[in-house]
Every structure is written in structure tokens, then in C-alpha cells.
Amino acid sequence: MLGIAINSNVTTEFFADFGVYDVTLTLPQYEVVGATGVLVNTVNNADATQTLTYHGDDIHDFAWTASPRYKVEKILSQEPWARFNSVC
């Protein structure tokens, strides 16, 4: 049989397992970053860079993006399910 085997990963939601990620990124301070997980630490370095540390529990992959043109939108609520940060 050639091609993709249909239903080859029927025992999980996706083929990859869930994982725990701790990721540290160092990039210029003017960059706005959007990333998977929770931002747990930010350090502004003397060389005009920033070091960001993210933590993610039970996620398939860690992904990030950066641009100085991004804008951050925040919605604050007392409800835990309604907390929202968006980079657009």
C-alpha cells in the first residue's frame, strides 16, 4: 500500500504525546513574542536583549513567533476560564 495509512493514530488525539516544556528565548528587547504556555520570567539584559522563559504543561508542541509590529490584547476577568492574552 502506498500513501498515508488512514486511522494510524486512533489511540490518541494526535500522533505526538503530550509533554511539559520549559523554554528560554533570548531576542532583541523591541520584539513582541507570542508563545505556547505561560510566561514565567522576563529579564531585560544589558546588551539590549530580553530573555523570556515559558512553561507549558500537557501540550503537544511548543511554538513561538516574534515581531516588533505585534500588539498585545488583554482581557481580564475573575473567571479562570476567561483569562486571555492575545498577540496580534
Image (tube, grey):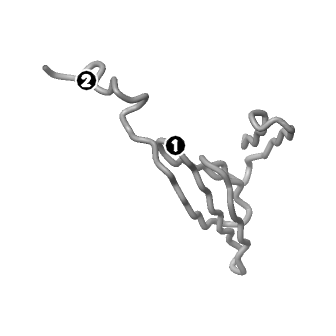
The C terminus, quarter of image: top right
The N terminus, quarter of image: top left
Q: Residue at x 74, y 49 (%)?
A: 69
- Residue 40, position in %: x, y? 68, 60
Q: Nearer the viewer, residue 84 or 64?
A: 84
Per the rendering, the mark at residue 4 is: 2
Element marked by disc 2: loop
Per the rendering, the mark at residue 44 is: none
Q: Residues within 10 Å of mark 1 (few under 14, many from 20)?
A: some
- The amino acid beneath tag 2 is Ile
Would you say 40 lies left or right of 17 here? right
Q: Residue at x 52, y 48 (%)?
A: 62
Q: Residues within 10 Å of mark 2 (few under 14, many from 20)?
A: few
- Position of residue 75 relative to residue 2, above or below, is below
Depth check, mark 1 against mark 2: the one in front is 1
Q: Tell me the quarter of the picture where residue 6 sits.
A: top left
Q: Tell me the quarter of the picture where residue 43 sits.
A: bottom right
Q: Residue at x 54, y 59 (%)?
A: 22
- Residue 14, position in %: x, y? 41, 31
- Residue 85, position in %: x, y? 75, 42
- Position of residue 54 relative to residue 3, above or below, is below
Q: Which sits earlier in the primary sequence, circle 1 or circle 2?
A: 2
Measured in 3D between alpha carbons, the distance from the residue under mark 1 to the one under mark 2, in whole angstroms, is 25 Å
Q: Nearer the viewer, residue 1 or 53?
A: 53
Q: Determine which residue is flagged by label 1.
A: 59
Q: Residue at x 78, y 34 (%)?
A: 82
- The amino acid beneath tag 1 is Ile
- Residue 56, position in %: x, y? 57, 50
- Position of residue 30 relative to residue 8, above or below, is below
Q: Tell me whether circle 1 and circle 2 mark residues in contact (CB < 8 Å).
A: no
- Position of residue 23 relative to residue 78, above or below, is below
